[in-house]
Image: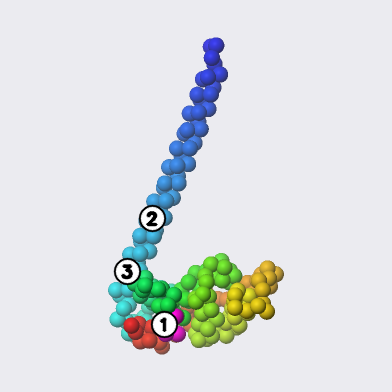
Amino acid sequence: MEYWYLWVIFALLCVATAFVLHKASHALHLHNDEKEKAFREIERYKALKAEFRDANAEKARETDPETLLTAMYAILEARLERADDPDACFVSMTAAQQYAYTMHYFLEDVDESLSHFFHYNGEPMRAVPAQALEAIGEPTLAAVVRDMYAMFDESREDVSLDTQAEADYDRRFLESYDRARVLEHCKQFITENLTDILSA
């Protein structure tokens, strides 16, 4: 047993190798889960596009608000993906199309916080939520969003990013925000403007 310490080192290496392999296996499993989730989402969007591209107001009224909003997003997203310049394509969309598209992202992001949307989205979409909320009948939320947007508006030199003010806007937004209510207002807006939103 003159070289007993070599066996100790060997044992430690075996344990370390097993640990690394376990972590790698776990990471691969998570990666595969994410790929499957992304694939299912793509298939869902494709199905919604096919189902709603020729939808009428009756179809919209029969659909739950979240599905309807996602369907409009899927249809408009496909148009942006085909464009050589997605930003220019977005700007060329009608107001109703911009509102329907942006509200999909907005409602996903504000589940984190209002500021989350502004930190992770740029122009031209960043300016749209306040207008969209006003249009669908949410003036209180629109006012808070408009105030926060001013802090992120790079064209304004009189307003700057303020951590305390940002937290205050997040709080004010949360106090008035009801996801189900906003989705219902989105549904009503989409139903009333469906022809416009689905127009080429």
| Residue at the top extreme of this rendering | 2
Q: Residue at x 45, y 42 (%)?
A: 24
Which numbered disc flags the more N-terminal residue, 2 or 3? 2
Residue 110 sits in quarter: bottom right
Sequence-first tag of 3 and 1:
3
Q: Which residue is mark 2?
A: 35
Q: Which is in the foreground here, disc 3 or disc 1?
A: 1
Residue 46: mark: 3
Q: Is residue 56 left or right of residue 192?
A: left
C-alpha gap between disc 2 and disc 3: 17 Å
Q: Magenta stretch? A: 91-95
The correct choice, above or below, for 185 with respect to 16 in the image is below
Residue drawn at (56%, 18%) of the image: 5
Disc 1 residue type (three-letter)? Ser
Q: Position of residue 187 (x, y in %)?
A: 43, 81
Quadrant of res 138: bottom right
Q: Position of residue 14 (x, y in %)?
A: 48, 28
Q: Position of residue 189 (x, y in %)?
A: 44, 85
